[in-house]
Amino acid sequence: MPKSLPYVGIAGALVAGALMAAAGGSHGVEVGGLPAFAAVVAAAFAVQWIAFIPAWFLQTERFFDLTGSITFLVLSASALLIRGGFDPRSLVIAAAIGVWALRLGPFLFLRVRRDGEDRRFRQIKPNFPVFLMTWTLQGLWVSLTAAPALAALLASESTPPDWTLATGLVLWILGFLIEVTADAQKTSFRAIPENRDRYITSGLWAWSRHPNYFGEIVLWIGIAVIAAPALEGWQLATLVSPVFVWLLLTRISGVRMLEARANRKWRDDPGYRDYVRRTNTLLPVPPRRT
């Protein structure tokens, strides 16, 4: 990795965060004469940098995912309280993010503690700028993913309930249930010692090689649908959130990294090659016949 790349990554994350702050803060309530949306985006990065300090000195990644989830909780609760808008749409958005974060953060934290490490960080932790870039990118992840929700929570006026609230909530529930079920099935599968070095092909994993990521994408689509009516002008740019989540999970990390690792491990296994041929990468559908 070129020595300048981490600094470019940090700068790029800050620029992208600033652009989103400007778009999401173009309307909505203010704090001290400044857009409240911009303040919560700045807080997203600040939390990561504060958490990075002990993580660097202790050379640990154990609290990385948990910090991300806590940031979602802090930002959504802060946005709700700043505006003081306890209308149905705002309460549903805040509750949806809260339930998701309270489930995912501890789940990932306990998984890392059980495994002893997060293998993604083996080469990252010893390198100060790369490790700092990773934490900074988490600030961008929180900011872009939660953008429509935060913009809606900080809207100047509340928007009455309508079909988008019901539709978005159904999508969120569907995505959340798929993600939770897929994670539970894989955790149970790996708890069996003889399955430690095997791949799962049962449950939702018989219909999709990455059903948990599909659920994650769907639930953020649901939140974007709920938030959309409360947005106006440049705030509509925050609806890029589910597209960003899809790109992140399928093209940057997530699916891309796991598929590469699985291919290295099981590429000579006829059963695995057959599983890949029959099973969709993301969208859960009945396996194809061979």
Image (cartoon, rainbow, N blue to C red):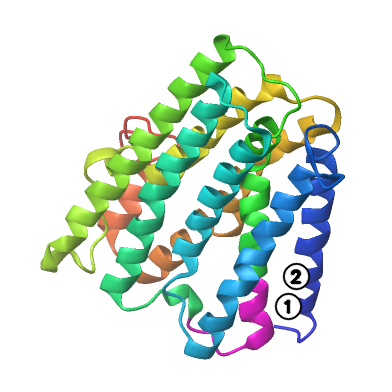
Which residue is labeled 1 in the image?
6
Tell me what residue is drawn at x 64 percent, y 72 percent.
Answer: 49
- Asked if residue 18 is among those painted magenta in the image, a careful observer would answer no
Tags 2 and 1 touching, CB below 8 Å: yes
Residue type at tag 1: Pro
Quadrant, the C terminus? top left
The residue range painted magenta reads 122-134
In screen coordinates, is 31 left or right of 50? right
Q: Answer whether residue 207 is visible to the viewer in this image.
A: yes
Q: Could you tell me residue 32's position as x and y percent?
A: 83, 48
Seen in the picture, residue 122 relative to 170 is either above or below; the reply is below
Residue type for callout 2:
Gly
Residue at 48 percent across and 55 percent down: it is 69
Q: Which residue is mark 2?
A: 9
Residue occupying image coordinates x 30% and y 56%: 272
Which of the two residues, 85 or 237, is positioned nearer the viewer here?
85
Q: CA distance from mark 2 to mark 1?
A: 5 Å
Mark 2: which secondary structure?
Answer: helix
Note whether residue 281 is visible: no
Q: In which image quadrant can residue 90 be found? A: top right
